[in-house]
Image (spheres, rainbow, N blue to C red):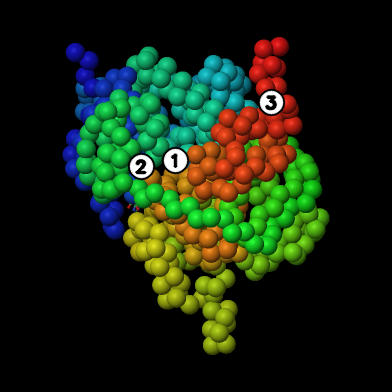
Amino acid sequence: MTPPRLQLAHITKRYPAVVANSDVSLTVQAGETHAVLGENGAGKSTLMKIIYGSVKPDEGSVVFNGQPVHIRNPQEARALGISMVFQHFSLFDTLTVAENVWLGLSRSLTLAEVTRRITTKAGEYGVEVDPLRPVHTLSVGEMQRVEIIRALLTDPKLLILDEPTSVLTPQAVDRLFGVLKKIASEGCSILYISHKLHEIRELCSACTVLRGGKVTGVCDPRQETNASLSRLMIGAEPPALQHREVKTGATVLAVNALSLPTENQFGVDLEDISLNVRAGEVVGIAGVSGNGQQELLYALSGEDTRAAAPMIQIKGQSAGKFGPGRRRALGVHFVPEERLGRGAVPTLGLAHNLLLTRRDAIGTAWWNRGWINVRSLEAQASDIIRRFNVKAGGPNAEARSLSGGNLQKFIVGREIDANPKLLIISQPTWGVDVGASAQIRGEILALRDAGCAVLVVSEELDELFEISDRLYVIAKGRLSPSVDRARATVAQIGEWMSGLWNAPAGAEVQHAQA
Ligand SMILES: Nc1ncnc2c1ncn2[C@@H]1O[C@H](COP(=O)(O)OP(=O)(O)OP(=O)(O)O)[C@@H](O)[C@H]1O
């Protein structure tokens, strides 16, 4: 009889502030796609990193293909045939896609050979990846595709995917699922972490649920409902969202015929973009990542100040030339798509991370003008931790010690807590568990009800339909007309995502048949 591909027994891993894994056992059969489910901070990534050799367990044993193993580092894991796609990208910004992939492969291959293999593999699986592009020019969705191709190129026996679809479009997810089903049918085992229950039900035949570092259940997810899985994960069902009637006020953000040539050769030119967001409404921008979202967000945040001043109006002021600080002074707050790096400084404590965007955290009274009041910073960070239910070892825990979803909750909480007049938020619930997603969406709606103008950029149509009052679609650097959420359909928005909003209905179908 074939031994299980992987058997973990009694794994325990303690960090100073928390026991991340406590007596965890888990078995994955050959060719099985096994989900690991649990709320943010439940210990899923830690367990995966133990299997991949990048974290050392305090107790417990690992058996791979029937053989006891001590995997001391990722090289040893890869030598055994274990490959991992991390939640936080592990790519070097200054290198090209091919150079990054090359780093993880056998030294006997030349760069040209690796480049060729990437193109072949990407073509075989229908995943778009350009091997020659420098990583710093890629959007997060594109980086995620590179991570996946890199893992597939090693022909793994066990593939670990830690939230691989968090920033992929529905079409890219479909393609990825096709690939995963194919490699599983060829005998590859897959450990699959996701907060999206429908994905788990579609892909996985077994599921281990963690809560507070302990196993709370092992089940066949296809036999479970969202409600029963939520109960295993968080002990309850996520609360339903309350939608109040829209009461819009004055226009807070107006973008007028914004055209901006891209600054890097792989970017997207913004062409004639006009949009507006009024007080008291949530406006969503849907679109496949890499279609100008990043460029638009840079122009809106003040990171790119090349736009002519009147092209970006914030509360009636021509703000195109304002830097981020002046825009924040007008009450504009941002949640960027990259949470480590742009959203937070990994090595700083959470309290000090407040200083990145919260001027109110710096003393303004005459006795401490310009001085940082560490106590009040800590108190503010503790408030956010409490309000947004962030699992962290206190206000001074380093940002990088938080689980992905908990860091996202902290960053979103930091900006919502600032009571903005205009909140611009990219991928608001990236990597956030079902309970916390419902909470973040609820907080966004509460901000809107309090009169804030909210612009949400997301690739998740479900999310946009859930929280937006109006929707735009961005494609190839151009923006569609806006449509009321109540009148929009997923099919129409999906069609617009390929830039077809000017075409007569059915044009795409005719084109496909021609
Ligand atoms: N390097 C570290 N130092 C200190 N604490 C850590 C470290 N890595 C993880 N932790 C803690 O261990 C716990 C489990 O984290 P882990 O990242 O495994 O959770 P997760 O289930 O993957 O969460 P998410 O869904 O948010 O990614 C968390 O409380 C986290 O703060």
CA–CA distance in space, label 2 to label 3: 45 Å
Sequence-first tag of 2 and 3: 2
Label 3 amino acid? Ala
As drawn, 347 above or below 460: below
Report the residue at 68% width, 62% height from top. Answer: 250
Secondary structure found at label 2? helix
Residue 52: where, in percent of width, then height?
35, 35
Residue 340 seen: no
- Mark 1 vs 3: CB contact within 8 A: no
Q: Quadrant of the N terminus?
A: top left
Report the residue at 38% width, 45% height from top. Answer: 434
- How packed mark 1 is, by other alpha carbons closer than 10 Å (few <14, some 14-19, many 20 or more), is many
- Mark 2 vs 3: CB contact within 8 A: no
Residue depth check, mark 1 versus mark 3: number of the one nearer the observer: 3
Sequence-first tag of 1 and 3: 1
Find disc 1 in the rendering and name its residue: 87
Report the residue at 36% width, 50% height from top. Answer: 239
Label 1 amino acid? Gln
Residue 505 circle label: 3
Q: Quadrant of the C terminus?
A: top right
Determine which quarter of the picture holds residue 66.
top left
Residue 386: where, in percent of width, then height?
37, 64
Q: How many marks?
A: 3
Report the residue at 34% width, 16% height from top. Answer: 187
Secondary structure found at label 3? loop
